[in-house]
Amino acid sequence: MTAARQPEHAAGAAFDRIASQYDELFTASPIGRLQRGVVWRHAVEAFPPGSRVLELNCGTGEDALFLAQRCVSVVACDASVHMIRCAKLRKSREAPGASVSFSMLSIERLQELETQPLFDGVLSNFSGLNCVADIASVFNQISSRTRPGAKLLLCLSARFCAWEFLYYASRGDFRKATRRCRGTATAKIGGQSFPIYYPGLRSLRKAAGPAFRLRSVTGIGILVPPSYLNPLVGRRPRLLTLLDRIDKVLSRLPIFRIAGDHMLLHLERV
């Protein structure tokens, strides 16, 4: 998960503290690769070569550089200054000629992109939008920065995660087991606490309003566990492969698609 904040926001400060470790903790982890792979399969379909995409909460640039390899032009933003530094360094090492620009900008300040041409698509991966209190205002800003027919891929932490509930309940920590169900919780990263929000699918559709049509919802991490369980299952590649295969079957089914670690919304600008 990457942060979405205005300057001085605690979430951004938290991700500043772990930016240098983020790829090791999540991006390169077995669970992280499997969960990101789901988003990438959808991104390849949603953003064909020649598209111009706005990426929110871009983190260390993993998704932006993936899209650039497929001839997609990306304007990538994040509220964490250290995440952006890592992303720029990665680009200079791995793909100096890539059509990607990285800049420090929180999701709440998208109006500052008003001088940019309209985008063909928007990507927000791994829970950046969960750091935003007023998500309806984000949809309003996105609607003014995208072309009709633009595709949105928005990956958020789900309101209920079966793995998380079972894991913490088995340890007797029912507060953590049900933290998502309450809709608002406090996250702590790098010793920094900040609020995090878990909107349900119904409220997200309402927030999107008439400007966007929901095309599909895909569950991510239904049987593949959350990344903080890497120490338990990350060293069992055969088990993870099996769980990933089952997830592909369950991911579009009602109930299951909103009971994973994340849910991926595919919307279209009307």
Image (spheres, rainbow, N blue to C red):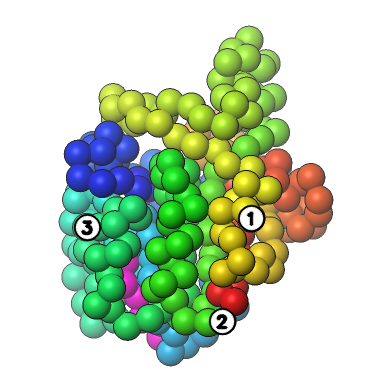
Q: Looking at the image, is mark 2 or mark 3 earlier in the sequence?
A: 3
Query: SS at mark 3?
Result: strand
Where does the magenta region start and end? 69-76
Q: Nearer the viewer, mark 2 or mark 3?
A: 2
The image position of residue 112, as x and y in percent, is 24, 65
Q: Residue 34's image quarter?
A: bottom right
SS class of the residue under badge 2?
A: strand
**Amino acid type assigned to the residue bearing label 3 in the image:** Met
Q: Residue at x 53, y 68 (%)?
A: 152
Q: Residue at x 73, y 54 (%)?
A: 251
| Residue designated by label 3 | 104
Residue 76 visible, this angle: yes
Looking at the rendered structure, which numbered label has been put on residue 149?
2
Q: How many residues crowd mark 3 within 10 Å: few (<14), some (14–19), many (20+)?
A: some
Please tell me whether residue 181 is drawn above or below residue 99 in the rendered image: above
**Mark toward the start of the polypeptide (1 vs 2):** 2
120 sits left or right of 46 in the view: left
Residue 113, percent from left and from top: 27, 70
What's the amino acid at mark 2? Gly
Taking 59 as reference, is 161 above or below it? above
Residue 66 appears anywhere in the view: no
Q: Residue furthest top?
A: 172
x, y percent for residue 81:
19, 50
Q: Compare residues 184 and 239 and report the one nearer the observer.
A: 184
* Left or right: 98 in relation to 45: left
The C terminus: image quadrant = bottom right
Q: Residues within 10 Å of mark 1 (few under 14, many from 20)?
A: some
In the figure, is residue 232 to the left or right of 56? right
Residue 205 has which mark?
1
Residue 64's mark?
none
Question: Along the polypeptide, which appears first: circle 3 or circle 1?
Answer: 3
